[in-house]
Amino acid sequence: GTTAPRGQRGGQGLPSALPRLLRVAAALDVPARWSGRCCCCSCAPRARCARPSPAAGERQGRGREAARGARAALTRERRCTVERADAALSYARFVERFAFSRPVVIRGLTDNAAFRALCTRDRLLAAFGQRRVRLSTANTYSYRKVDMPFQEYVEHLLEPQDLALLGSDTLYFFGDNNFTEWGSLFQNYVPPPFRLPGTTSAYSFGIAGSGSGVPFHWHGPGFSEVIFGRKRWFLYPPEHTPEFHPNRTTLSWLLDTYPRLPPEARPLECTIRPGEVLYFPARWWHATLNLDTSVFISTFLG
Ligand SMILES: *[C@@H]1O[C@H](CO)[C@@H](O)[C@H](O)[C@H]1NC(C)=O
Ligand SMILES: *[C@@H]1O[C@H](CO)[C@@H](O)[C@H](O)[C@H]1NC(C)=O
């Protein structure tokens, strides 16, 4: 169904300078920037955004270290251990090799240039700014829903992930879409052409800040595509329950847990960019991390 993945942000008692440092880090590498808004590094004197807040005090050292880790996590182009394919992949081959057995990243399967043009910040705000959207907390099991005007979400909540916040305290816009109100937009989305026998498809659309994401969870099969921004995926087969805390963010998992994993316990992982879709089979565990402010859409096959 269209159930939004759940995630949580892990509170780690980190200093208040961190959100700003993260924002700086996140601004460094943005191939397809969604936000028309200036970030502090492009419109303020460099000194202003490079210096942590004096209020951070004695926690500064730890904050700097964490921010460095977060910055590396968001900017480094990591390996891709998910199989890749391109538009030459036939449906028969997709069914035989991937549909029921392993994820795949397929480049050039859809062309959503027209949809992308409708999804810029200005166009979405002009068309849907006053519409209410339903947000979910970003945690794995129990999650809260909050309704607010789309414009308010974009202007006040669409921030880089704050490392000091729990997933259960972070609001994420993904899924719970009103297809009546947003129908004029979604009819322009070109979904991946591959279907599984006996399934119907349902869209789940969202927008979220850099460093945000949902922690490990699983559900039925589907495709995920980014329209703006990059999204990193971590996947485990159904028989391998990952080590993670359901209330902590993917970012905190990546910084704290991932480095301790022995090689054989590492997930499959890949960063997808606009023009690529990732297919996940049923019941595969997955966590996501938006490396940039991202606009994304999934096609769930259920
Ligand atoms: C979707 O929007 C329509 C039109 O504004 C409204 O009548 C309907 O209740 C909404 N549906 C949900 C599930 O919120
Ligand atoms: C996660 O957060 C929820 C909501 O705040 C809470 O009820 C639950 O006990 C927490 N789970 C764990 C494992 O800490």
Image (cartoon, rainbow, N blue to C red):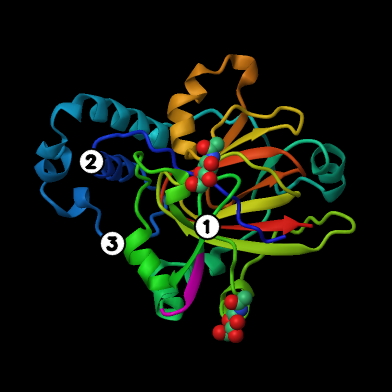
Which of the numbered marks, if any, corresponds to residue 16?
A: 2
From the top left corner, tell me how far across and down residue 47 is, in percent.
10, 41
Q: Main secondary structure of the magenta part?
A: strand
Which of the numbered marks, if any, corresponds to residue 152?
A: none
Which amino acid type is marked by label 3?
Answer: Arg
Q: Which residue is mark 1?
A: 144
Q: Element at badge 1?
A: loop
* Label 1 crowd (10 A; few <14 / some 14-19 / many >=20): some
Q: Residue at x 15, y 27 (%)?
A: 58
From the top left corner, tell me how far across and down residue 145 is, in percent.
52, 62
Vertical placement of residue 8 versus 64, above or below: below
The CA span between labels 1 and 3 is 29 Å
Mark 3 residue's CB less than 8 Å from ligand 1: no
Specify which label sits upstream in the sequence, 2 or 1. Answer: 2
Vertical placement of residue 181 versus 49, above or below: below
Q: Nearer the viewer, residue 56 or 125?
A: 56
The residue range painted magenta reads 130-134
Which amino acid type is marked by label 2?
Answer: Ser
Q: Residue at x 35, y 48 (%)?
A: 160
The CA span between labels 2 and 1 is 25 Å
From the top left corner, tell me how far across and down residue 222 is, in percent.
72, 51
Q: Nearer the viewer, mark 1 or mark 3?
A: 1
Which of the numbered marks, if any, corresponds to residue 37?
A: 3
